[in-house]
Amino acid sequence: MSMATTLKDLDPVSVRSAIEYLKQAGNPFRNHFARNADDEACGRFHVPELYARERTMLLALIEQFREKPGEDAGLLPVLGNKGSGKTHLLHTIKHGAGGRQIIVTPGTYQRDTDFLEYMLFQVIDTLLGGGRQGKTRPLHVVGLDVACRSLSAALASLPSSERIQLFPPPFLGGLLGKLGLGHDQAREKCSWLISKLENSHEFESANDLLELCDEAGLDAQRACDLASSHAANSMGRATQGLMIASVIKGFCHAIFLGDESELSSFLTFGFAEIEFHVRPSRADLVLSLFRALMEIMRKARVPVVIAFDQLEDLLLARRGEDSFRIAESFFAGIVQSLHQVPGLGFLLFAERGLWNRFVPSLDGYMRDRLTNPVHLPGLGTVQAIRLDPPQPILVRLVVEARLRSTHAAHACFTGLPACFPLDPEQVDRVARTESTLRDMLQQFRAMFDAAVYGEQAAVAAPEAPTSENPTPVVLNRLLPRTSVRETELAQAMPDVVVKSVVEVAVNTAPTVAASSSQDNPDLTSRLIELWDLELASARRQLSPDGALCGATREIQSGLGFLLRLINERGIRVGPWRLQHVVESFDYGDHPVYGVVSLGHWASLTGSPWKVGVGLFLGRGQGKLKDLSVKLASLDFDPALVDHLILLRPDDDLILTGKSRQLWQDAERRGKHARIESIDLDGFASLYALPRVHATAIETSDPEQVRHHLASLLHDKADRLLRQVCMPVQDI
């Protein structure tokens, strides 16, 4: 049955009115895939019946992680073709399950970092960040349980003399206490409060706990001190116990006092400053903190699951890199984590082709561990979950979900089919012939345009530049004017293929020189939309107090990606040009502060400079330590860094006391460094950049994406580009 025949059977007046309304409402199939597991579009267009059994299996696995937290939690792959709905399924697990769990969804893979260290700071970023899972931040999910259990244990251990001081009788309390009276009342009130605290799972927020304490006559500061002191006294003096007690103290400060800086400071600085009998290595520090966090999660019965989505893009080899070596390192890291960190679970959302390409070729021990089946009570033994194309009836539900809000918005759709303006038979035909849900949605988008607008737009994809001959991009920095002709540049740098030269006067705004073959308005507009969405998400993630420090490694990863993009796209800063980039270089024994990104800059005149760019985010006592570790990168022999750029939050730029003295000492020793002021948007841009790239290359050519992304950065993050890319002047 054709569309025309279908419409003929309907009321023509209603059809015309509905079509006119749809022309103004827009195409609901335009956003045909989820950007990531936090994309709100997943919730708007969710169909519970789609992959219902697979969702049940995943939730059962997470529940098993909760019920058996001390065991080796395990791993489960979720396999499907690109566009099969893996990301949407992950969204429903992360945000729609309604349970108390922490689902960590890394947006980047820091392949140059120790895997366990990378995993730890993914968990810390999720814990301290402003992102919510469902309606609640993970910090509040865990912190509320920790605070209640710690306060309950502290109250239960109090002797009678301290209980009566804590809950004195209402009249002449001090005098009655000294006379040994009022003990029964204090004991009853204490028992009542303990019984209420044992039902902490009924609390919706920290306010419920604070109201309970207030009702019992216990102020928040006193409750925080009691819980923190009990943790410090009961955990022992071993390294693991000290770490657990400090993390509990941080959670108590966050819940009782609304101060998250204590937790953030310990997780990014204090854990490395504990008075150790024997100074542990960097790897041992990371493992100890990771186990301490997991022990707290275990007691709170909050499972921690690392869910890697779009694994094929995370492991995609860069130009000249061995993809198998990267994949082998990644899977080896997962197996190592499973054995070293009890209770940690993994979900791997991957293309079947990638899984079948790499896993059978791995070492037998790793292969057996990755393919070891898990038993789900009531559901059987599962080795992998496979997402096959949905049945036509489910696809029709997906179409109806996309159109539902539009149909409900106007009375003209009354009496029309739920999938109007699409033909039900055409929907079923597409469902039977297309291989993935994304391909189906692309077809429905075209069908909608044809039915509503009478035409089907087709935009030819522009030709991508070859990797051997990239289109150059020129960033005109506010430098003394450089008058360089194309022939002179070619003679000075014979290894560089010169496509164009831009002469710019002083104070001229940055421009991008791009060939016409790269023009792709559709990709440009999509990148702008992605950028705005990811930047807003990054702002939310980094807004809470302490979240910026918790995201140190993620922001540093974005900084390294930015430098690589500048290098690949041939961006020049005045007479300077990047020749080589090391995205992330780890050094020293501090896992948070001991990392910088390196860029080797060459100019037409003078020697090349090795420029290190790092984050200077330490606060309070961590400020001096952070600065000392960063300045240590200037002391390597032979020189690792000739000039150091430190990115510092704009609300704390002043160096005082020992920090100022440390900086001045470096200057006296002839070291070159500077501090750049960065606002929240600047850090959010670095956080968002790799995620924009990862989302865009899902459906577009990576070379085109990186070219347009470099152009977009001139408009969206021009100031940041100038700060991190400007090499040394007048030296």
Image (cartoon, rainbow, N blue to C red):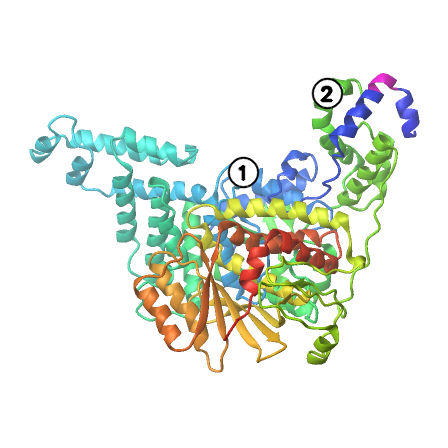
Is residue 76 visible to the viewer in this orientation of the structure? no
Q: Nearer the viewer, residue 542 or 78?
A: 542
Quadrant location of residue 503? bottom right
Please name the residue shown 55% across and 76% down the image. Answer: 609
Would residue 202 be found to the left or right of residue 700 on screen? left
449 left or right, relative to 541: right
Residue 132 in view of the camera? yes
Q: Whole-percent x and y of residue 251? A: 37, 46
Q: Say the numbered circle drawn on residue 410.
A: 2
Q: Earlier in the sequence, mark 2 or mark 1?
A: 1
Q: Amino acid at mark 2?
A: His
**Highlighted range, magenta:** 10-15
The residue wearing badge 1 is 134
**In terms of depth relative to the viewer, which is nearer, 270 or 116?**
270
Above or below residue 605? Residue 624 is: above
Q: Secondary structure at mark 2?
A: loop
Q: Magenta includes 433?
A: no
Q: Main secondary structure of the magenta part?
A: helix
Between circles 2 and 1, the one closer to the viewer is: 2
Please tell me in which quadrant of the rendered image residue 284 appears.
bottom left
